[in-house]
Amino acid sequence: MINKINRILLALLSLFIVGSCSDDFLDRDSLVGLSEGGFWQSEQDAIMGVNALYDANREFTNSIVIYGMMDDFTDISYQSWATGLTTGNFPSNASFYSNSWGIFYKGIYRANTVLENVPDIEMNQATKNRILGEAKFFRGYFYFKLWDFFGGVPLYDTAMNVDETYKPRSTEEEVYNFIVSDMTDAFELLSENYDQSNKGRATKWAALAMRGKAHLWAEQYEEAAEDFKYLMDNSDRTLIDDFHSLFRVAGNNNDEVIFDVQYIAEQGYGLATDRNYGNARGATSGSQRTRPTPKLVNAYEIIDGTPFDFANFTDAGGDTFDPNDPADWQDEEAVRRLFENRDPRMQQAIVVPWSTFVGRNEVEYLYKFPVDTSDPLAYVPIWTAGSYAWRKFVETGSVYTLQNNMPQNFPLIRLADVVLMYAEAKNEASPGDQSIYDAVDAVRERAGLPDLPSGLSQDEMRERIRHERMVELCGEGQRYSDIRRWGIAKDVVDGVWMTEFTGVNIRQRGFPDHYYLWPIPQTEIDVNPALTQNPGW
């Protein structure tokens, strides 16, 4: 299941590094140096043990934030540097796959250890229930990630010894059922909310959202819609008015988040979005490693709900604006018109030409294009030939300067995601239902857009929902799983060129047929002959 090094690491309880979440329980004492035999005696032991699950979750998030949470492997953002998952040339022995596999099974081992030891500890029953619920939630969550990326995987429900880690792969259906069972138990055990000292812990709403998500991935649409609807009707989560604040430090622990990874401004405990999503004018001098694509920007509607189309715009000479002609991008007035009166989420998520960005020393920089490197008040991106940049997850001003350690929480599930998943599931189960329109319209109305037109067919509504997920959740890592489960990844990615917005080609993308599932890491097959490889690898 895991390579020899990871197997040794997982067997040592001393490697339970205290996990993420709020300032309060992020700073609890480490378990380093404690022996397993002398542990699991007290309530504090149980709390420290379950905190390690949050650390495993944070570890995976930290490893993929450099890829725009894996949106870089889709059609809406791209890597500034060539990587195998963007070009279609990634071998099965790549460390990316084995590292991810190892993180998930490390988390599962830790969850199983909690579930085996905590029931026998004499402690407050409510706290015990919460801890067992957290362990069930994370075990199901890590298996969901394995299922999403790898398909069927070995199922372990105990803290396995070395000689017990040679199971064959379970079927995808068996993994799905295991996830549903864990999330059902977690829903019963967890609370709806916590006090300030425990903000960031998994709640019953996180468990219900993940159970619904498992149903949706398994195409059990009625069950998915029921779970999402119950959450929408009974939780205290709400779509907050200020979309942009969802992705800023000031918006941490907002009323829309259902589950997130929490960070503090401390070396080793912060988030690296400001560097990888950020730009050269920010306080941390971001690298713009991940960048939005022209396809994403062009997908944002006109404010009246009509699709954006270059054919409706003219260049400086009065001819139809040609986005593939660099000369048409030379005229300020013509370019400004392209980005006026658009879906407000575009400007809230992305830095476009002739918009402003408040950077280091609280200076407001203007993104002139062509880029003007001589103007001290001009926004100068890392990539000057025609690049959009992320505004999402990029702090303005100079409050936080620790480059790889922003105290920005990263949402893994928020209500807008759940609402759109409800609409998707309901459209597949009961097309034409008014609640589908109500759900999508709620997200659009928050953005300032008009409601959907009535009378949409099931196919038309499906495309509307997919469009809404693309623009609402961009940069949050949902798109990669979406296009794979919808079976459209090859269509929208394979052979497509990454381009500057001026039409200049950068690099051709690749998405072979076998990329819908990741390969079982070759290192794992080497040590566990019972494992079989996914097709095509």
Image (cartoon, rainbow, N blue to C red):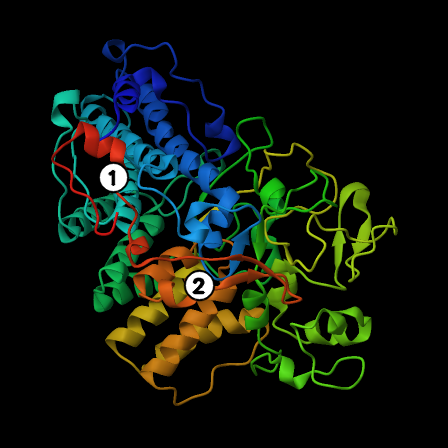
- How far from the left and from the top, in percent, is residue 514? 28, 55
Circle 1 packing at 10 Å, graded few (<14), some (14-19), many (20+), is many
Distance in Å between CA atoms under marks 2 and 1: 41 Å
Query: Which mark is on residue 163?
Result: none
Identify the amino acid type marked 2.
Gly
The x and y percentages for residue 114 are 25, 27
Image height check: is 470 above or below 34? below
The residue tagged 1 is 136
Q: Is 7 above or below relative to 393?
A: above
Residue at x-position 45% and y-position 52%: 86
Q: Residues within 10 Å of mark 2 (few under 14, many from 20)?
A: some
**Residue lying at the far right of the rendered structure:** 375
Q: Which quadrant of the figure has residue 348?
A: bottom right
Chain-order first, disc 2 or disc 1: 1
Mark 2 sits on what residue? 495
Amino acid type, callout 1: Lys
Frontmost residue, 327 versus 453: 327
For the N terminus, the image quarter is top left
Of residues 443 and 392, the one drawn nearer to the viewer in this rendering:
392
